[in-house]
Amino acid sequence: MGRYRFVLLAIILSLLLSTCAQFDPQWIGTWVDDKTVEYVTITLDLGEDEGTLTVDNAAPDAKTTKSIIKGSLKGDEDTLTATISSIYAETNENLNGFTMTGALLEAYVTTEPPDGLGLPGLTNSVSYRIEGNTMTLTGQLIIVLTEGQSDTLTAIKQ
């Protein structure tokens, strides 16, 4: 009789756990914005718990032509938080040397942890809303990515 109670309890417990609401991240996928900033394409390749943000800048006077930021992701229904693990940048061959300027420098300065231990572990959060195949991101990180041109980025799912 005791074994049957245990089996019945296990079945009830598994049914209860399976009916609990679990958060399903809607941000998963590849999202592209090529309209917010002239000559700039921002691609967000987001998984459930990690992502890559690529900024391609085709402006003739761009110092940094490509930036790739990788990191881990956490979020809920309206906020997405990224913890940066690496930043990679390519420079315009027409310019002499590489100087950390613009968005890359600002991203480093505005997110540097108070302990000053360096780049990995920097965090930023943005508010997001998804309607159909469009994701709208808002926050300080967007101001950094667009070099102050906008605090909102609208990306289309690919």
Image (spheres, rainbow, N blue to C red):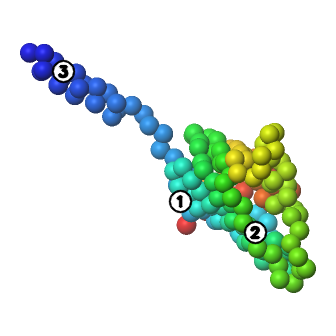
Answer yes or no: is residue 54 visible: yes
Toward the front, the furthest residue is 117
Residue beneath label 3, please? 6
Label 1: element kind: strand
Residue beneath label 2, please? 89
Mark 3 belongs to which amino acid? Answer: Phe
The image shows residue 12, relative to residue 90, as above or below, that is above
Q: Nearer the viewer, residue 134 or 149?
A: 149
Mark 2 belongs to which amino acid? Answer: Ala
Label 3: element kind: helix
The image shows residue 94, relative to residue 143, as above or below, that is below
Q: Nearer the viewer, mark 2 or mark 1?
A: 2
Asked which quadrant contains residue 78, the reply is: top right
Q: Whole-percent x and y of residue 76?
A: 57, 39
Mark 2 or mark 3, which has the lower sequence index? 3
Q: Whole-percent x and y of residue 154?
A: 68, 58
Q: Whole-percent x and y of residue 128?
A: 65, 47
Asked which quadrant contains residue 70, the reply is: bottom right
Horizontal placement of 144 versus 132: left or right? right
Residue beneath label 1, please? 29
Which quadrant holds the C terminus?
Answer: bottom right
Q: Nearer the viewer, residue 4 or 21?
A: 4
Label 2: element kind: strand
